[in-house]
Amino acid sequence: MIMKLLHVDSSVLGGNSVSRQLTAEIVADWRNAHPNTSVEYLDLAVDTPNHFSADALGIKVGVQAEPTEAQRRENEVSERLVTQFLAADVIVVGAPLYNFTVPTQLKAWIDRLAQAGRTFKYTDKGPVGLAGGKTVIVASTRGGLYSTSEGGQAMEHQESYLKVIFGFFGITDVRFVRAEGVGMGDAAKAAALSAARADIAVATAGKAANQDQAALAA
């Protein structure tokens, strides 16, 4: 059985990006551990969806009988991205910390995925995620240190946001590969990459969540 992996980068730094370096290593290690994996690549710095707008929401809320051409175009983008996301068993996401949160390119992609009836639904008991059974591996990169102090943890809205939004979609298997302090000199960067590669070894050795569920059901 072929496992589908979606590889998503969002850094604007191109070849100088640490998160791009790490996502490439994650995907390579995953394929070594799981040879039956096919990979689809999405570069959000190159193919960036428009920021969420009334046109992107228009068809979904049905405020008028006939959608406009702009609404149709934006809906096509949303449907392409959510269909691609839902088809994947494993999603590897490069998520650098920009100004205490994720890049706007990554946020724009997530806004297209957050569709009632596709990745979540509302019930009388609250929202329920519809995209469970996936594994998400996030390459989290940071120029400074945020995980080692209460103040730093309060300032970051990167990993905390991604945990919440993927959890909202019903995804409980979210793994983080973290390299922080990469902007604090060569020694700190080398230590951060070493720690991240140890995280990669752990993150890619485990099975995908849906495979775990299938094994339990067998």
Image: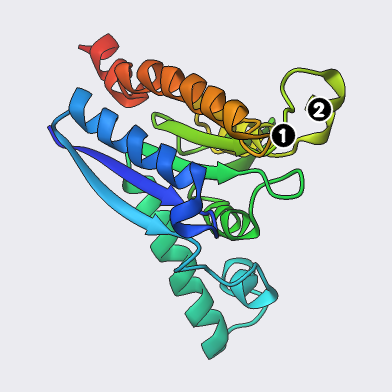
Residue 9's mark? none
The structure residue drawn at horizontal position 72% and vertical position 34%, both measured from the top left corner, is 144
User: Quarter-wise, where is residue 42 in the image?
Assistant: bottom left
Residue 66 visible here: no
Q: Earlier in the sequence, mark 2 or mark 1?
A: 1
Q: Residues within 10 Å of mark 2 (few under 14, many from 20)?
A: few
Q: Name the quarter where the C terminus is drawn.
A: top left
From this viewpoint, which residue is outermost toward the right?
A: 151
Q: Is residue 35 above or below residue 47?
A: above
Apparent side of residue 94 relative to residue 56 in the rendered image (left or right)? left
| Residue 162: x %, y % from top left | 61, 37
Apparent side of residue 27 relative to residue 139 in the rendered image (left or right)? left
Q: Name the quarter where the N terminus is drawn.
A: top left
| Residue 190: x %, y % from top left | 52, 27
User: Quarter-wise, where is residue 217 in the image?
Assistant: top left
Mark 2 sits on what residue? Answer: 152
Residue in the foreground of this view, choosing between 13 and 92: 13
Q: Secondary structure at mark 1?
A: loop
Amino acid carrying label 2: it is: Gly
Residue 144's mark? 1
The structure residue drawn at horizontal position 48% and vertical position 61%, both measured from the top left corner, is 44
| Residue 85: x %, y % from top left | 40, 49
